[in-house]
Amino acid sequence: AQSVTQLDSQVPVFEEAPVELRCNYSSSVSVYLFWYVQYPNQGLQLLLKYLSGSTLVKGINGFEAEFNKSQTSFHLRKPSVHISDTAEYFCAVRRIQGAQKLVFGQGTRLTINP
Amino acid sequence: GAGVSQSPSNKVTEKGKDVELRCDPISGHTALYWYRQSLGQGLEFLIYFQGNSAPDKSGLPSDRFSAERTGGSVSTLTIQRTQQEDSAVYLCASSSYTTFLAELTYEQYFGPGTRLTVT
């Protein structure tokens, strides 16, 4: 089975400051990794994904994430946040072979203060 | 193009009543998924369809929950004899093949959800 732990339930930062949202996963098989964003009263939108290759992946809205296999981590970063980045962020994994379902972390609520 | 749509957007029902939630996937997407988002449990997988068949129903919480998909398109999630703990946002997603470095991968595209409130 797979599990995902997002280490911070809430992260408040000031506008234009850098941010890192932490994600660790556990799996006995190889997985794909994803970050999704959910704006208030909306569905989930894919920010970025790691499938294979370069461990640094870039996504939409200036976000990037680094896959670290030895630490089983996939932390999300942005060098300078904007008010519009206020949202809930979910880390998720999916088995490469077999089950198609996404297994999500509990989410991190990012609040940007002016 | 059109994304995943779900209806209704909000549903309030009395405990013990049956409800049906509908999902229209992106045209041509062969896979369809239902998830549930609640305060206590976070985002949980419910069921996965490939075409009209459901190879993975492992997330359905009880036999009061069922889902079907017809014509490889629209899906309906039915909850019978609703309970207060069924209150949640029910999300639908769909996916199809995308090629990435000669691998076939699936990205899931989510709808806006149906907020179910059981009173």
Image (tube, rainbow, N blue to C red):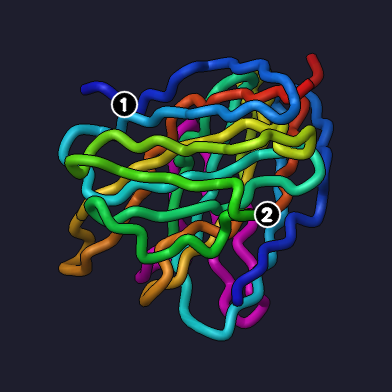
Residue at horizontal 74 percent and vertical 55 percent from the top: A6
Q: Nearer the viewer, residue B66 or A98?
A: B66
Using residue A86 as the reference point, say whether residue B10 is left or right of it: left
Residue B108 in percent (x, y) is at 38, 46
Q: Secondary structure at mark 1?
A: loop
Residue identified by numbered label 2: A105
- Inter-mark Cα distance, 2 to 1: 24 Å
Task: Tell me how many marks there are.
Answer: 2
Residue at horizontal 37 percent and vertical 70 percent from the top: A52
Q: Quadrant of the C terminus of chain B?
A: top right
Using residue B76 as the reference point, say whether residue A36 is left or right of it: right
- Assess whether residue A68 is covered by the magenta stretch: yes
Using residue A6 as the reference point, say whether residue B52 is left or right of it: left
Residue A79 in percent (x, y) is at 63, 39
Q: Residue furthest bottom?
A: A28
In the figure, residue B5 lies in which quadrant? top left
Query: Which residue range is magenta in the image?
Result: A51-76
- Assess whether residue A90 is covered by the magenta stretch: no
User: Callout 1: residue from which chain?
Assistant: B
User: Callout 2: residue from which chain?
Assistant: A
Residue at horizontal 48 percent and vertical 29 percent from the top: B21
Residue identified by numbered label 1: B3
